[in-house]
Amino acid sequence: MISISLPPPPPPPPLSKTCFIMLLSSCGLVVLNFYKIIGQEEEKEYSKYGKIQLVRIYKFGYQGKGSQRAFFNYYSKDTKFKGSTSIKDNYQIGDSIEIMYSTRKPFIYKTLKW
C-alpha cells in the first residue's frame, strides 16, 4: 500500500479594506434601522395610548454609568412605575415635571418640555 501525502491547502486571501468597510457599513445600517423602528413603535404607542401625568422628582442619583439623573414615580392602573430623566435643567427635589406614558405598555415613557 502506497501512502501519498497532499500539501495543505493555501490560506484564504486576506479581507480587502473595501470589503471590510462595506461589512461595517451594512452592520451600521442595520443598527440605525433598528433604532428607527423602535422610535416609530414608541411614537405609535404615544399617539394611540398616550397619557400625560404630572410627577414629582423624589431623588437624584446615578443609573449605571453616566451622568446624574432625576428619579420619579408614576402610576398606571394602580401600579407604581419608576422613571428617570437626565438633569438638563436645574431641577430640585420636589419639582414637578410632565411625562407621557403608554397605558398599554406603561414602561414606555418620555418627559415633556413645558
Image (tube, helix red, strand yellow):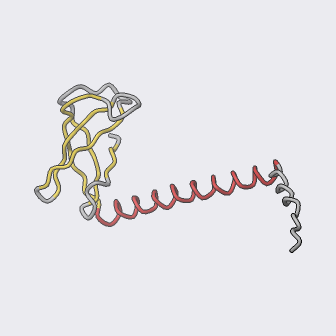
- Residue at 39% in and 59% down: 42
- Residue at 17% in and 30% down: 94
Percent x, y of residue 63: 32, 35
- Residue at 49% in and 61% down: 37
Percent x, y of residue 31: 57, 55
Q: Quadrant of residue 45?
A: bottom left
**Left or right, 11 with reference to 76:** right
In this view, 52 is above or below 94:
below
In this view, 92 is above or below 49:
above
In this view, 104 is above or below 27:
below
**Left or right, 61 with reference to 56:** right
In this view, 67 is above or below 79:
above
Percent x, y of residue 27: 64, 55
Percent x, y of residue 84: 29, 39
Quadrant, the N terminus: bottom right
Total count of labels: 0
Which of 104/10 is in front? 10
Quadrant, the C terminus: top left
Q: Quadrant of residue 57?
A: top left
Which of 84/9 is in front? 9
Residue at the extreme front: 1
Which of 1/105 is in front? 1
- Residue at 31% in and 51% down: 109
